[in-house]
Amino acid sequence: MSSQKVFKRLQHVKSCDDISCVESHADPHLDIILKNHTANIQYNIESGDNSMRKILLVEDNEMNRDMLARRLARREYEVIVAVDGQAGLDMAREHKPDLILMDLSLPVMDGWTATGKLKADETTRDIPVIALTAHAMTGDREKALEAGCDEFDTKPVELKRLLGKIEDLLA
């Protein structure tokens, strides 16, 4: 079963105890989806807030993905993840997130190409995209903006700065 199908099943889970009813599969990316969804459910149960803004995090580095997803979930964002540009494109079309955090150096399809395709698609063009990259070379920001990114941020992520950009784009 693909991680996207498992995520669809998880969308109907209403308590942390219900997570145990989701079958475990040999999907290397299922763990992060389960962790994020469990954190989101726990937050919803404790706060009563079911109107979380949805962020699609497209990041292939597991440590970066896990760290950023957890930090965003703690700040009341629902986080869904993709591990390559093509999966990010597919998930954006399927889940219609409020914002996308797009790593630029991705396998299968790089972030520049994925962003270009998102912005060319009538159904996803209005979703704000923040480029994330460890490559802060001269011209990288301009290249990301030319590809259609609405904002640019460097890694390692400075959370306060990134949150400011996220809030500005979601306002």
Image (spheres, helix red, strand yellow):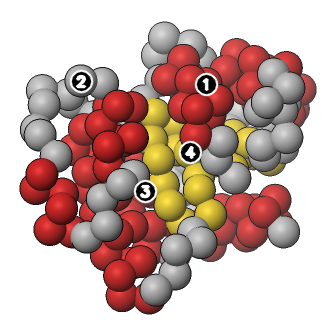
Q: CA distance from mark 4 to mark 3?
A: 9 Å
Please tell me how crowded label 3 is: few (under 14), some (14-19), or many (20+) other residues with Cα within 10 Å: many
Image-quadrant location for residue 145: top right
Q: Please name the residue that numbered disc 4 is placed on.
A: 56
In which quadrant is the C terminus drawn? bottom right
Amino acid carrying mark 1 in the image: Leu
Amino acid carrying mark 2 in the image: Met
Query: Mark 3 or mark 2: which is in front?
Result: 2
Query: Mark 4 or mark 3: which is in front?
Result: 4
Q: Please name the residue that numbered disc 2 is placed on.
A: 1
Q: CA distance from mark 3 to mark 2?
A: 22 Å
Query: Mark 4 or mark 2: which is in front?
Result: 2
Image side of residue 44 versus residue 110, left or right: left
For this orientation, the residue located farthest to the top is 108
Specify the label residue 158 is tagged with: none
* Residue 59 shows in the view: no
Specify which label sits upstream in the sequence, 4 or 3: 4
Q: CA distance from mark 4 to mark 2?
A: 20 Å
Spot occupied by residue 124 in the image (x, y as percentages of width and height): 77, 33
> In the image, is residue 105 above or below residue 132?
above
Q: Please name the residue that numbered disc 1 is placed on.
A: 89
Please tell me how crowded label 4 is: few (under 14), some (14-19), or many (20+) other residues with Cα within 10 Å: many
Please tell me how crowded label 2 is: few (under 14), some (14-19), or many (20+) other residues with Cα within 10 Å: few
Specify which label sits upstream in the sequence, 4 or 1: 4
Specify which label sits upstream in the sequence, 3 or 1: 3
Q: Please name the residue that numbered disc 3 is placed on.
A: 69
In which quadrant is the N terminus drawn? top left
Q: Say what secondary structure mark 3 lies in.
A: helix
Specify which label sits upstream in the sequence, 4 or 2: 2
Specify which label sits upstream in the sequence, 2 or 1: 2
Image-quadrant location for residue 127: top right
